[in-house]
Amino acid sequence: MKRRAQKGGEKAPLIDEDYTRWKSSIAVIYDWFTNHSLVWPSLSCRWGPQFEQATYKNRQRLYLSEQTDGSCPNTLVIANCEIVKPRVAAALHISQFNEESRSPFVKMFKTIIHPGEVNRIRELPQDSNIVATHTDSPDVLIWNVESQPNRNATLEVNNFSRPDLVLTGHQDNAEFALAIGHSEPFVLSGGKDKSVVLWSICDHVSTLAADQGDAKSPGSGASNPKPSAEGPTVQARGIFQGHDDTVEDVQFCPSSAQEFCSVGDDSCLILWDARTGCSPVVKVEKAHNADLHCVDWNPHDVNYILTGSADNTIRMFDRRNLTSGGVGSPIHIFEAHTAAVLCVQWSPDKSSVFGSSAEDGVLNIWDHERIGKMESSAVTERETSPPGLFFCHAGHRDKVVDFHWNVSDPWTIVSVSDDGEKTGGGGTLQIWRMIDLIYRPDDEVLSEMERFKSHLPTCT
């Protein structure tokens, strides 16, 4: 399997006991939950655009990767998902799921034969039908998934789909670190060459969106892309040097496509500003005690940055307090995972909430505003909860390699795990939404319970 999925410890702890306890309680802790067994592990999952709204459920695109063993090609998968609206799903249906079943709410719509494993998928905010992917190469690939033809992944083993754009600039493989700007169509990448590379695809977005899959070269303008066997190429806008080891993740500042951050195997967190040159603005040389795997920038408050590491912790930094050199001074260190943290992401629904997933098979939901507050805990699978932790999704049976909050459907998450040999290979995709009694303010919950207490059975 991928090196990234194995870092941070020799062996992930057994999670069978946690999983068994979790399974017995899903009917009461989830408003909606569905499980989809995958033939091949998925290293990345992302929500696409919502395309239909109905009375009881909405339909939305979902982007997935398939990491095969080489017997058939790797693919970028576009699925259609039915997202059940809040308080519609039946508890009985939720509790009767089978780990090996394929969800009726997830239907494969299209496959794109990808030239190599799809390590990362990122969608363009300006047009979520356009996505960027990372594979084991120096290039970033751009796809219009709507206009790309559906390909047969079994028969056309060597006949790869042709990307709409190829972004060049790395000198070595760039496998995981990938981001797209919130405010402008800029693409950011990091790789084994220890560099962070920035591209602008502003000149190509309108052509990419309008392209219906013909052979014309998408885009024109200052970068003058030229057709090639792999697709038209776009040169880098800037190459930023400052890391001393592989760059593992990158993220744009939500308010500026010129500001971004990166983390890597050198334990560094670096802040950059393209307007001031290609050198670090701030370089925290000891942000964690081990390799950094992931980073995310708060979309609600641009002062807060999250990092996750092979030291099993998540750290929250205030960029106003960061200084170059020495040991970083996080606002808080979040400790609950028992293996390397692989993904962190702020919630789009509440500014203080974020999720973290790890090799221990758990996806934790945190609220940093709860730290230091005395309140009832709704944490599942834990007798005592670390500060800030208020929910544990323990439905995966091996490392949770990626997850994504749904912007169109509040508090809904898609998560994927690489199940490996423990469950006979393959992977698991789950879509879930915790019951709202867990995250709503206590006074609202108590008021609602008071209104409905007459419907509850009484004990004699």
Image (spheres, grey):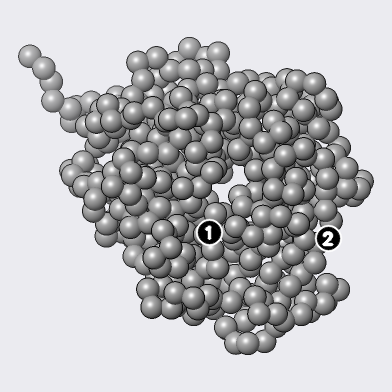
319 sits left or right of 312 in the view: right
Q: Position of residue 392 (x, y in %)?
A: 40, 30
Say which residue label 2 marks. 237
Q: Is residue 353 visible?
A: no
Q: Which is in the foreground here, disc 1 or disc 2? A: 1
296 sits left or right of 282 in the view: left
Q: Quadrant of residue 246?
A: top right
Residue at the image position 33 percent from the left and 44 percent from the top: 421
Mark 1 in CB contact with mark 2 (< 8 angstroms): no
Q: Is residue 29 visible?
A: yes
Q: Secondary structure at mark 2?
A: loop
Residue at the image position 53 percent from the left and 31 percent from the top: 8
Which corner quadrant holds the C terminus? top left
Q: Nearer the viewer, residue 72 or 346?
A: 72
Q: Secondary structure at mark 1?
A: loop
Tag 1: Cα neighbours inside 10 Å, few (<14), some, or many (≥20)? many
Q: Position of residue 177 (x, y in %)?
A: 65, 49
210 sits left or right of 19 in the view: right
For residue 280, above or below residue 193:
above
Say which residue label 1 marks. 118
Check the image and name the residue furthest to the right. 276
Q: Position of residue 262 (x, y in %)?
A: 72, 41
Q: Nearer the viewer, residue 16 or 62?
A: 16
Three-letter code for the amino acid on which mark 1 is drawn: Val
Three-letter code for the amino acid on which mark 2 is drawn: Arg
Residue at the image position 78 percent from the left and 76 percent from the top: 225
Q: Quadrant of residue 52?
A: bottom left
Q: Which mark is residue 258?
A: none
